Amino acid sequence: MDRYSRQQRFAPIGATGQQRIREKRVLVVGAGALGAANAETLVRAGVGKITIVDRDYVEWSNLQRQQLYTEEDAIKRLPKAMAAATHLRAINSDVVIEPIVADADARLLEYLVARDRPHVIIDSTDNFDVRMIINDVSQKYAVPWIYGACVGSYGLSYVIIPHETPCLRCLLEEVPLGVATCDTAGIISPVVHMVVAHQTAEALKILVNDERINRKLVSFDIWRGQYRMIDVKRIKKDGCPSCGDKRTYPALQYENETKFAVLCGRDTVQIRPAQRDGWEWTTLISFLQQQGIQVERNDYLFSFTVDWHRFVVFFDGRVFIHGTNDIQEAKRLYYQYLG
Amino acid sequence: MRCIINGETIELPHHVRTVAQLLRHFHIHEKIAIVEINMDIVPKDNYEQRAIADGDRIEIVHFVGGG
Ligand SMILES: [Zn+2]
């Protein structure tokens, strides 16, 4: 197996480590900049299986840093998970790649983790709601996860090992609101790779059972030349609702209502209906066409524009309404055209 | 008072004497910040009491959501 020879020659991995990597399963949540780079690195490293979950589709503004995607993916508006799977399979056909086009909600993540018992979960999401779900699933099923995030030229990474390191909820007493996002503060590709380098190095250590996992919170600013590691073990909380003695996993309490969420800085509202089955898309599309609305579709979604609002409807029921940050307006538009 | 914050020497105004005041000074919400003084992490419930001193090396880590 010449393919992995250089990785095997690296003493801490070796032939035994390579065999272990081959037998492992990884769940990557998010297929944006972090997800694409994490998935590519782990697929090249030869993991057994990767499941990659993402709700979004490829757009032109992604191509500057989301390394798996091509112009063709953006032209076709392919869902990121599907486009990623195609490219990942071309990179390494040994790896089982499972793309999932869906919002990474509590129900889905808990299902995937209970089903597959992945050996590590890689956070490549862009928001703390999903991270808190990952955090609770990780604790409930005792699967380590690796937080990664970046904006501008600043990035962070941190490994959460259940029963050992403080969890994300220990570190963060509340979900940060209104923090800078890639859309408002921009982002440069090198910081993505620095975050991913930390996440994948720790993932490889976990996969080969190496004890030298970095338990510190790592943060850096690659433009200003700052790099620091902080030992956070003292802030593990006994009373933490996610990892403490009387844990309740607050992020896993399922909700059964249609959810409207502003996608930060994107001038977009996402609608996630509670009920997912039985959508009559063909009927709906012809109904829209009868009203003179031009509908474009591919295998995963259809889209149309009314005034200055673009609707993107995924066949799993989720809808993006672009051109608004106003939940009330989005609700009105949603029920008017799709309700 | 002069402290080294995230590697940069910064002159702090007189009214900044505790970790909580420091975070307020930099407009950082205390519940989402991790603060380390001289290589020692400060528990969040100590932010109001924990004094900072001239020459302290302070690291403030803030979380971001992007990816
Ligand atoms: Zn905790």
Image (cartoon, grey):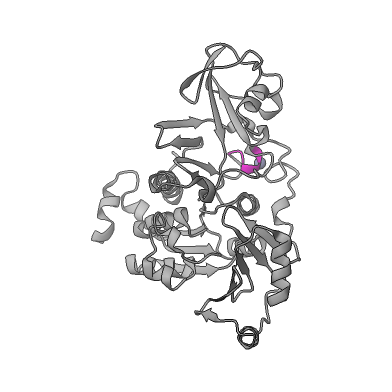
Quarter assignment of residue A164: top right
> Is A154 or B34 nearer to us in this picture?
A154
Q: Is residue A166 magenta?
A: yes
Q: Which residues are magenta?
A: A165-170
Query: Can residue A145 be seen in the rendering of this structure?
Result: no
Residue A143 lies, in percent from the top left, at: 57, 52
Quarter assignment of residue A305: bottom right
**Image position of A135 (left or right of B55):** right
Residue drawn where x is 44% and y is 38% of the image: A212
**Quick check: B33 above or below A42?**
above
> Is A244 or A189 nearer to us in this picture?
A189
**Quick check: A227 above or below A183?**
above
**Quick check: A186 above or below A278?**
above
**Image position of A152 (left or right of A306):** left
Residue drawn where x is 74% and y is 57% of the image: A253
Residue drawn where x is 43% and y is 32% of the image: A227
Residue A14 lies, in percent from the top left, at: 31, 49
Q: Is residue A168 magenta?
A: yes
Quarter assignment of residue B56: top right
Quadrant holding the N terminus of chain A = bottom left
Query: Can residue A199 be seen in the rendering of this structure?
Result: yes
